[in-house]
């Protein structure tokens, strides 16, 4: 589980097994000089964000593995995730109206796990956290997802 892969046509598909619910948002960490692998963040209704290390991204047969699972921030679905331009920070926004900011070290696990830097309630309604992550993306943070409410 977590390592299945299938390449078809000009683009490969990653089948990420690890969440216990639907995935609402995905975001690639910006490519850094000398980096041989990419990092993909996935935001899910299971209240977690998983960071995946992907080798061979852009090829017909990429391989991947779960590197870290971030669970200590949201009490409801995580709808968005967005990376800072330098790839050192990851913002998440959830249906609980909470936005979180994690510092993500360079390299593999030996560099240390991502650390929660900030957790804040953004508004009284469920869209506040997702709106904050969307706003972070608009302020130079790269990310994506469809989430609820048609934002994206």
Image (cartoon, rainbow, N blue to C red):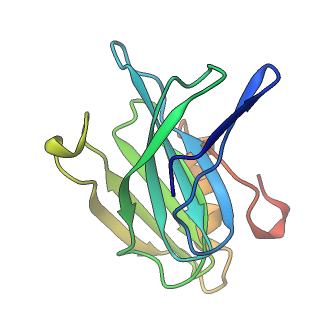
Query: Which corner quadrant of the image does residue 33 belong to?
Result: top left
**Residue in the image at 46% along x and 23% along y:** 31
**Residue in the image at 49% along x and 85% along y:** 75
Using residue 150 as the reference point, say whether residue 101 is left or right of it: left
- Image spot of residue 117 (x, y percent): 28, 61
- Image spot of residue 86 (x, y percent): 39, 30
Query: Relative to residue 138, is residue 128 depicted above or below?
Result: below
Query: Which corner quadrant of the image does residue 138 belong to?
Result: top right
Of the pair 105 and 6, the residue shown nearer to us = 6
Query: Relative to residue 80, is residue 139 depicted above or below?
Result: above
* Total count of labels: 0
User: Is there any visible trace of residue 82 in the rendered image?
Assistant: yes
Of the pair 16 and 142, the residue shown nearer to us = 16
Of the pair 35 and 61, the residue shown nearer to us = 61
**Residue in the image at 35% along x and 75% along y:** 72
Q: Residue furthest top?
A: 34
């Amino acid at each position: 589980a977590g390592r299945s892969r299938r390449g078809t046509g000009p683009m490969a598909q990653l089948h990420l097994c690890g969440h216990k619910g639907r995935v609402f948002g995905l975001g690639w960490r910006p490519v850094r000089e000398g980096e041989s692998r990419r990092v993909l963040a996935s935001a899910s209704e299971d209240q977690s964000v998983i960071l995946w290390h992907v080798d061979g991204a852009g090829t017909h047969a990429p391989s991947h593995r779960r590197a870290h699972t971030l669970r200590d921030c949201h009490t409801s679905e995580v709808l968005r995730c967005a990376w800072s331009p330098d790839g050192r920070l990851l913002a998440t926004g959830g249906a609980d109206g909470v936005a979180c900011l994690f510092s993500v070290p360079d390299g593999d696990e030996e560099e240390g796990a991502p650390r929660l830097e900030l957790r804040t309630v953004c508004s009284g309604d469920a869209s506040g956290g997702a709106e904050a992550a969307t706003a972070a993306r608009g302020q130079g943070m790269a990310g994506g997802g469809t989430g609820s409410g048609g934002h994206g």
